[in-house]
Amino acid sequence: MPTGLKRYQQLGDLHFVTFSCYHRLPYLMSAEAKHIFEHSLEAMRGKYGFCVAGYVIMPEHVHLLLTEPHVGLLAIALQALKISVSMRLPERPFWQRRYYDFNVFSEAKRVEKLRYMHRNPVARGLARAPQEWLWSSFNHYATGGIGTVEIESPWTMARREGLVLPDVQTTGHGAAFGVAQIPHLRTKSVRRYGAPKIQLITNLLMP
């Protein structure tokens, strides 16, 4: 590990993780590559027992917001994820060797990182609005839709517990993209896979 790079794991925090393609080349540019990443992420989520609170797949890097895994260490789970993706795509080498890991220690930081991830495609000029970028967790938070990757959210929590969330108000700009605004609900904690409790936002993070 390079001098100055420290990891603080097994502390019960959420982790904001970033890793990049080799030399930041756009190996994840195609829809096929992004779908492969999503399927690998979901497979590793099930195998190692971590929760995915959010993600975005960019052409040359990925951001993830994760709990620590129930099985093994986060570093091992991430290594398995990277191997799973690289084995299914032709580029060699596929990934940069290391990854960035930021401990998310508060609700404010969790919301900050989700906003950053969901707005990243817009900031890069890849989409006009977060809901246009299909390869992130934004549309799940906005609509409750079930995608390839299970997102730990108020929608998932309600579905798991057999609850029905209040009706949502769909408005102009959101309706054009099938996006609904979720009414403010009480924030609630959940525990899954023995992972630490994480606070889930209960309102849509609009830009």
Image: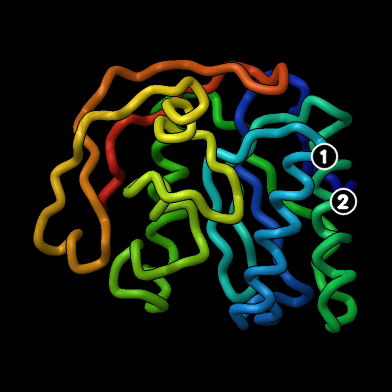
User: Residue 110, image x and y in percent?
Assistant: 46, 34
Horizontal side of residue 205 vs 22, given as left or right: left
Horizontal side of residue 67 vs 151, given as left or right: right
Please give the name of the residue rendered at 64% of the width and 18% of the height, measured from the top-left corner.
196
For badge 2, the amino acid type reads Ala
Residue 2 makes an appearance in the image? yes
Callout 1 secondary element? helix
Please give the name of the residue rendered at 82% of the width and 59% of the height, measured from the top-left corner.
82
Q: Quadrant of the C terminus?
A: bottom left
Give the number of the mark in front: 2 or 1: 1
Compared with 139, 107 (above or below) is: above
Image quadrant where residue 96 sits: bottom right
Compared with 115, 22 (above or below) is: below
Residue 100 vs residue 168, the one in the foreground:
168
Compared with 14, 139 (above or below) is: below
Compared with 152, 37 (above or below) is: below
Callout 2 secondary element? helix
Image quadrant where residue 92 sits: bottom right
Please give the name of the residue rendered at 34% of the width and 63% of the height, measured from the top-left corner.
131
User: Residue 10, image x and y in percent?
Assistant: 77, 22
Horizontal side of residue 11 vs 183, given as left or right: right
Instruction: Read off the residue under disc 1.
Output: 47
Q: Earlier in the sequence, mark 2 or mark 1?
A: 1
Horizontal side of residue 170 vs 26, given as left or right: left
User: Residue 144, image x and y in percent?
Assistant: 39, 44
